[in-house]
Image: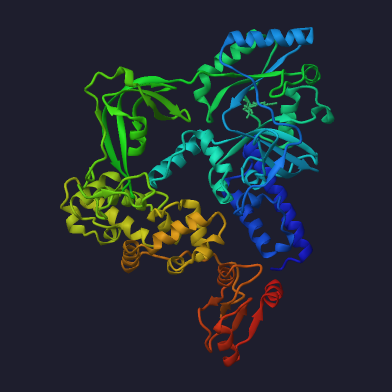
């Protein structure tokens, strides 16, 4: 690096400021000012500098939204003023009554209401000092809550540095968008884990995680709607406060309305009762607030809620349907999911015909029978759920649902993998349903991206015995393919070319395509970037995996478990044998270490061993595992092993971490 330390400091500050500006434009204003690619580039540059110069570490750096510590437990913190809840109502009469009370207490009707949507999430308080985010607390019992500062830092839209250096406390709602909820539950279903009932539970479950890497992965979001001591900032109304939030960099829910009469309030609620499903997140009502802060003070609060506000909730939309039949689907890991075919009903904007029954414990708990009338609702307003069965409407010919005794696809044995699992799986490792799903994931766009090998052809090739395991993709025979119906000479050539081309994919594509439990595209890229080589990743310890950003203990365990599975090991060996690339290309930064061979031993304060290896390789050097006459330097950290003795024997130059840093800076 040819940067002086002063320049480094300025560059880091500049990058942080620029990234924060783009974050604000993207998350708060919803109008991006940079392409994803350029943003990633800025982010990577900052991350690299911060890693290399840990002396400029700052808990408020935008990169902290990605890195994630595992907490030991939750600290309880008192609220500065109690976090009250609101009175609830579901009908228009109560709203008119509320309005009558407010008018009576104020002795006038010259005021306005600000109506907001009631976000269905978990509420929290956040404190800022001189513009920096210092503390986040859950509502808890209203008087004290739990410290979730590290969780909140990882919500992409949440500003950890305000645009003005204010000291203040705001309150708002953490929520999970419906799309994120759907994605997480689909993944959990595939992995045989218990599902979240709705986005609110998913958001609540996420902020209760000690492993904050989970938060970073789960796409939480937050709206701010309340400011403590607003008059201190010269604000007179809730409408002004909401504008001020935006100006400071907070995200606010945009569909608010200023209402001059109770009729307008009711119209707002009616409109959103009908339109609620069009939003990308769940709302469960409207919140009506007296807009003028001066009048709020006159109204005051009771012990549990303010007199100037009320929650006007929506009735939940539910419909009845009949369970016509039940099918089973078999996923990549063999999880067998019962799915109910229902008599069609219109619900929350679409026609519902099917609902997942998730697993057989769920079926038993809810006592759902074939032929039952059931109450259907949409979780997160998108995924149809059966709420309960209506036992009163049974006529006597309903039948209980039993778990299948054999796999519905391959007729193989079924059972639970672990005692504590709720999921029943097909235990046949050669089950064609499992195989088809895993090949689909392998050839998918994010995986090995083999165009032309989609669901239909995979089905055909598996059924005809041409694909019995993943590596068979690379052993497909031209003649046998041409012999298949509807397979022309030209399409066979194209397909085989595509397959051949895929052999050269970088490691992260292979990792994504393997469908390693809990490893998505992002983690696959992290793993590939850090380990560079499949062999090294296969040998990685849980501790080494945990050092990576975004990987917690649970995930490290899952990854280790995957690579230790003998069936997986065989597949990986075979893929390498047929010529699939197992390395991540190294982006060349310079060739200053060209011709030099390093051996690394011991532990380092500012680098993991993999980071050192990457730095050396990126700059043209070679890293070898053992000391020999060819070794140029032994890079030695704390607690070195036998390599240090060997180096002493061979008179190999030894370099300490401090010497390395000095040298790396200069060369
Ligand atoms: S105002 C004293 N505004 O609903 C101020 N609350 O049932 C109280 N909520 O605990 C909160 N959206 O968790 C307010 N726009 C909104 C809201 C909102 C959701 C939640 C919040 C509160 C609960 C009250």
Q: Is residue 52 left or right of residue 497?
A: right
Residue 54 in the image: state x and y as whole percent.
Answer: 70, 63
Q: Quadrant of ligand 1?
A: top right
* Image-quadrant location for residue 138: top right
According to the image, what is the colour scheme of the structure? rainbow
Residue 89 in the image: state x and y as whole percent.
Answer: 59, 16
345 w.r.t. 383: above or below: above
* Image-quadrant location for residue 654: bottom right
* Quadrant including the C terminus: bottom right
Residue 251 in the image: state x and y as whole percent.
Answer: 66, 34
Q: Is residue 154 left or right of residue 507?
A: right
In this rendered view, identify the residue nearer to me: 589 or 401.
Answer: 401
In this rendered view, identify the residue nearer to me: 81 or 566.
Answer: 81
Q: Residue at x 59, y 8 (%)?
A: 93
Q: Residue at x 59, y 38 (%)?
A: 221
638 w.r.t. 372: above or below: below
* Quadrant including the N terminus: bottom right
* Residue 159 visible, this orientation: no
In this figure, what is the number of numbered marks?
A: 0
* Image-quadrant location for residue 98: top right
Q: Is residue 600 left or right of residue 9?
A: left
138 w.r.t. 594: above or below: above
Q: Is residue 399 left or right of residue 565?
A: left
In this rendered view, identify the residue nearer to me: 328 or 470.
Answer: 328
* Residue 70 visible, this orientation: yes
Residue 354 in the image: state x and y as whole percent.
Answer: 33, 29
């Amino acid at each position: 690096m040819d940067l002086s330390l002063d320049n480094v400091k300025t560059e880091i500050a500049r990058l942080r400021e620029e990234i924060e500006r783009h974050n604000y434009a993207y998350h708060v204003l919803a109008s991006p000012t940079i392409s994803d690619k350029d943003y990633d580039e800025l982010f990577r540059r900052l991350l690299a500098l911060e890693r290399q110069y840990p002396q400029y570490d700052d808990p408020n750096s935008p990169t902290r939204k990605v890195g994630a510590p595992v907490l030991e437990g939750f600290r309880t913190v008192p609220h500065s003023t109690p976090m009250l809840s609101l009175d609830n109502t579901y009908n228009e009469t109560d709203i008119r009554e509320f309005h009558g009370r407010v008018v009576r207490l104020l002795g006038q009707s010259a005021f306005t209401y600000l109506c907001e949507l009631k976000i269905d999430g978990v509420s929290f308080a956040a404190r800022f000092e001189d513009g920096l985010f210092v503390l986040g607390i859950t509502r808890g019992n209203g008087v004290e809550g739990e410290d979730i500062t590290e969780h909140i830092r990882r919500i992409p839209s949440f500003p950890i540095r305000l645009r003005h250096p204010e000291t203040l406390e705001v309150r708002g709602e953490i929520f999970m968008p419906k799309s994120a909820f759907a994605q997480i539950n689909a993944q959990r279903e595939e992995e045989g884990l218990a599902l979240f009932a709705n986005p609110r539970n998913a958001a609540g479950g996420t902020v209760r995680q000690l492993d904050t890497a989970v938060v970073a992965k789960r796409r939480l979001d937050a709206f701010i709607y309340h400011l403590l001591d607003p008059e201190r900032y010269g604000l007179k109304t809730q409408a002004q406060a909401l504008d001020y939030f935006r100006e400071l960099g907070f995200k606010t829910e945009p569909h608010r309305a200023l209402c001059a009469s109770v009729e307008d309030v009711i119209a707002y609620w009616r409109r959103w009762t009908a339109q609620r499903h069009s939003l990308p997140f769940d709302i469960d009502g409207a919140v009506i607030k007296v807009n003028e802060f001066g009048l709020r003070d006159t109204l005051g609060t009771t012990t549990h809620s303010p007199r100037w506000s009320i929650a006007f909730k929506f009735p939940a939309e539910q419909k009845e349907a009949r369970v016509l039949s039940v099918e089973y689907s078999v996923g990549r890991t063999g999880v067998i999911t019962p799915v109910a075919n229902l008599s069609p009903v219109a619900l929350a904007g679409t026609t519902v015909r099917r609902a997942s029954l998730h697993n057989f414990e769920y079926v038993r708990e809810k006592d759902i029978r074939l032929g039952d009338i059931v109450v259907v609702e949409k979780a997160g307003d998108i995924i149809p759920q059966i709420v309960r069965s209506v036992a009163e409407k049974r006529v006597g010919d309903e039948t209980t649902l039993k778990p299948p005794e054999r796999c519905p696809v391959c007729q193989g044995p079924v059972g639970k993998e672990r005692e504590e699992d709720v999921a029943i799986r097909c235990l046949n490792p050669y089950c064609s349903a499992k195989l088809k799903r895993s090949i689909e994931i392998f050839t998918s766009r994010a995986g090995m991206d083999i165009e032309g090998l989609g669901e239909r052809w995979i089905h055909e090739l598996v059924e005809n015995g041409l694909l019995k395991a993943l590596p068979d993709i690379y052993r497909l025979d031209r003649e046998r393919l041409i012999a298949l119906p509807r397979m022309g000479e030209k399409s066979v050539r194209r397909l085989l070319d595509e397959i051949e081309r895929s052999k050269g994919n970088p490691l992260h594509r292979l990792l994504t395509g393997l469908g390693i439990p809990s490893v998505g595209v992002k983690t696959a890229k992290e793993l590939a970037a850090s380990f560079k080589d499949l062999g090294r990743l296969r040998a990685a310890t849980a501790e080494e995996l945990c050092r990576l950003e975004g990987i917690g203990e649970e995930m490290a365990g899952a990854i280790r478990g995957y690579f230790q599975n003998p069936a997986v090991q065989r597949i990986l060996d075979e893929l390498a044998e047929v010529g699939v690339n197992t390395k991540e290309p190294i982006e060349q930064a310079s060739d200053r270490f060209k011709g030099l061979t390093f051996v690394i031993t011991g532990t380092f304060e500012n680098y993991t061993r993999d980071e050192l290896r990457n730095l050396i390789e990126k700059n043209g050097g070679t890293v070898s595992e053992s000391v020999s006459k060819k070794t140029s330097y032994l890079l030695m950290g704390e607690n070195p092993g036998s390599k240090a003795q060997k180096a002493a024997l061979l008179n190999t130059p030894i370099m300490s971490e401090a010497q390395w840093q000095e040298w790396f800076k200069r060369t």
